[in-house]
Image: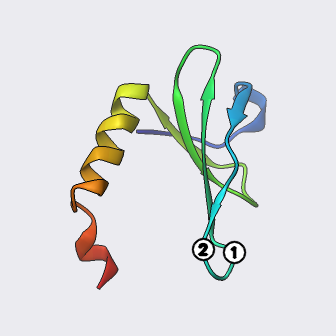
Amino acid sequence: MSATTTAATAPAIDWDLAFCSEGANCFRFGLDADGRAYIGTTGSAAYVSDSREALRALITAVKGGAADHLLV
């Protein structure tokens, strides 16, 4: 995924409602008009973006346990 942080080059992103855990650590997902996928946090203009297919692969891998070692 590629990182983008400047507001001047930011595309119009249609953000979903944020997913928040205890302590207000919130992540959000979005799409732009070209179908690119975005992951960002609330309270920051920074985000990462890639294709919708790459986001699908990431979510599938996480659901399959690829990041479980980070939770111990």
Few, some or many residues within 10 Å of mark 1 (<14, 14–19, 20+):
few
Name the image quarter holding the C terminus.
Answer: bottom left
Is 11 situated above or below 41?
Answer: above
Q: Is residue 48 left or right of residue 71?
A: right
Front-most of residues 41 and 45: 41
Q: Which mark is residue 21?
A: 2
Q: Residue 15: in sight, yes or no?
A: yes
Total numbered badges shown on the rendered structure: 2
Q: Residue at x 70, y 49 (%)?
A: 17
Residue 24, numbered label: 1
Instruction: Using residue 26 as the reference point, say whether residue 61 is left or right of it.
Output: left
**Image x and y of residue 39, in percent:** 55, 45
Q: Is residue 51 visible?
A: no
Could you say which disc has been placed on residue 58 in the image? Answer: none
Across and down, in percent, residue 11 comes to: 70, 25
**Image position, residue 19 (x, y; %):** 61, 59
- Against 67, residue 38 (above or below) is above
Q: Looking at the rendering, which quadrant does residue 71 occupy?
A: bottom left
